[in-house]
Image: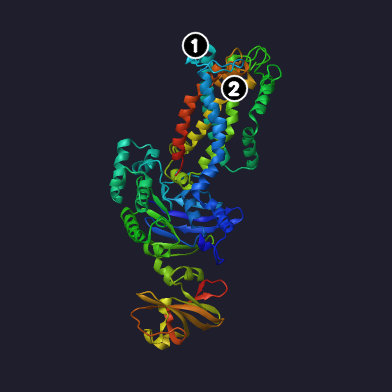
Amino acid sequence: MAGQVTRAGPLTLGDRIALQFRYLLDREALLGPLLLLPAVVYIVALVGFPFVLALAYSLSDVTAGDQSLDFVGFRNFTDIVHDPIFRRALRNTFVFAFASQALVLVLANVLALALMAEFRGKWLVRLLVLLPWATPAALSTIAWLWLLDSVFSPIDWLFRQAHLLGPGTPLGPNNNMYWLGRPELAMLSVIVVHAWRILPLATVIVLAGLTSIPQDIKDAAAVDGAGFWRLFLQIITPLMFPVVAVAVLFGFIFTFTDLAVVYVLTRGGPINNTQVLGSWAFIKGIQGGDLAQGAAVALFLFPVLLGVAVLMLRLARRAEVT
Amino acid sequence: MAAVEARGVRKLFGPVKALDGIDLATREGEFLVLLGPSGCGKTTLLRIIAGLEQPSAGEIVIGGQVVNGLPPRARKIAMVFQSYALYPHMTAFDNIAFPLKAQGMPREERARKVEWAASILGIHDLLGRKPRQLSGGERQRVALARALVREPSVFLLDEPLSNLDAQLRASARDELQGLQRRIGITTIYVTHDQVEAMGMGDRIAVMYQGRIRQVGTPLEIYEEPADTFVATFVGSPPMNLVEGESYLVGFRPEHFLPRQAAHAPSNDSWSFTFRVTRIEHLGADRLVYGIVGSAAGETKVVSRLPSTVDVTLHAGESYEFAVPAHRLRFFDKATGSATER
């Protein structure tokens, strides 16, 4: 460090401090932790602390009215497990996550392959594809709420115009589908809205994976006699597996933990048929005031998310295409 | 086995003419090299022959059949890419078996064919490995085996040696040519390396700016270049071009010798006063750079003296150099194409 100083003579104290300070950020032992600090603070404050709090709540009898933490063991867990609505919510959470991701997997691949091709107005299509991702979940779900309205749904109107809906048509005598009023249709609606939300991200990830496969490999397969399906299933899919898996796991986590779509769209209805862990925890813990049981419900998300996170980290390490 | 023919092939990439009317025919079983600087269109031509690109105009004929519009897999061709393009998730065995699988060949027969191809290229021990566990030379062999295994009628090779180190390249050149001779498959080989072209090709097609400038045996290309581009692209150092009264005079550096070392009688050779500016000693040869006077003033030329010529030369001094008359080549000043004097 002294070699950097051109002026002759002994250094003053001020010089020495200035020197120390000037090269402070070149010391990795210091710079590393410094740069990590904001993230650590953020995670501890907004993830770590609430998580510990949830653990504590779930083992206590805390309510909105009585906030003293009295230890009750696993009583909350045994209580909620015997509740049929909870079991329904648990099942729905998995059904929604798996079904929407299966849908996303197919659609994202189709979209990404289509977006690989050159055509006019490609930028516009790409922009439109990305739009759902940029819209806040609550807002876009409200738009869906209108689209699926029991009386004024434009989807129903289209069906009626196509003579699919109404008296004497394939979809029945009613003039409306009642998307959110019939249990199966309500579940389908939730799945479709989830898929619609995740699709942009998944498409972009798949697109990135597709473009990273060297043209030579695809050319070689073409020369070697592979048609579209052989190329897609035996060359592209295995090469993209780590990338696609990350996309699917991302989507899975998003859907699995989401409460906005169900809460805005159906409030868990009709008659708790579309309830998920997130919405049920919210309804029980916040709206019902039973913080302890709400926390216990939410904690059921934890083991699944932990498993998915571990899987994702392992895949991310393999996610190099060539 | 089949001959390949390109008839009036043009290729436009937007406003850029990548290929500007290519007419070229291979002979059956021939090793034809497409030689040219990068960007001359040689890889584009190869890709059009393979069916990976469609020509903007013209026809590709393989084995007497026009194949325009046929996908690559219907053309009975095999291609080796510069990057080898091995499938990274498959073992060498599966890589080689892939084209056979695409043909729907039964498993046992497939295994037999892979064994056969592996034994020709000596890669038996590598069959269980993935491409990333193979060295450059080994990858190249696997790529060759994959091309060889379904016995194509045409082999297309796109700079397959350019990713190997110099030492390996020499032996690979040798092996590749030997392999082609043994199996006798018509081969089109793209390279920008004239040493490869000269050493391996039965014939060379020299390409420049989307056109074929000359097709001929390596010796023809070297001795009788069709124009000044071929003359200066082939040969290292390239042919010297000196401006004469009404034409350009060309001569190879190895024919440009000190008068006392020239074998031709003085009445049958051209003399130049050669001012030496720099001398490179390369061991077997000396490269002597300098300047001769010409119709256009002064021209830089090079002489290549084998170490057997022990005439003492010094930079900065002038000497009498000569070229045997029958070694001189003449080119039109305006078009650059070869002419009789």
Q: From the viewer's perspective, is the residue at label 2 or at label 1 nearer?
A: 1
Point out which mark residue B109 bears.
Answer: none
Q: Say if labels 2 and 1 share a chain.
A: yes
Residue A213 horizontal/vertical position (percent): 48, 44
Chain bearing tag 2 is A
- Residue pictured at 62% horizontal, 33% vertical: A133
Residue A255 horizontal/vertical position (percent): 55, 26
State the CA–CA distance, disc 2 to disc 1. Answer: 25 Å
> Which residue is farthest right?
A152
Residue that label 1 marks: A82
The residue nearer to you, when weighing B197 against B129, is B129
The residue nearer to you, when weighing B287 against B41, is B287
* Residue A67 seen in the current view: yes
- Mark 1, Cα crowd under 10 Å, few <14 / some 14-19 / many 20+, is few
Residue B210 horizontal/vertical position (percent): 53, 60
Residue A228 horizontal/vertical position (percent): 48, 38
2 or 1: tag closer to the N-terminus = 1
- Residue pictured at 46% horizontal, 42% vertical: A321
- Is residue A129 positioned above or below A259 on the image? below
- Residue pictured at 41% horizontal, 63% vertical: B197
* Residue B341 seen in the current view: no
Point out which mark residue A190 bears.
Answer: 2
Identify residue type, mark 1: His
Q: In this figure, which colouring scheme has been used for the structure?
A: rainbow
**SS at mark 1 in the image:** loop
- Mark 2, Cα crowd under 10 Å, few <14 / some 14-19 / many 20+, is many
Chain bearing tag 1 is A
Identify residue type, mark 2: Val
The residue nearer to you, when weighing A198 against A25, is A25
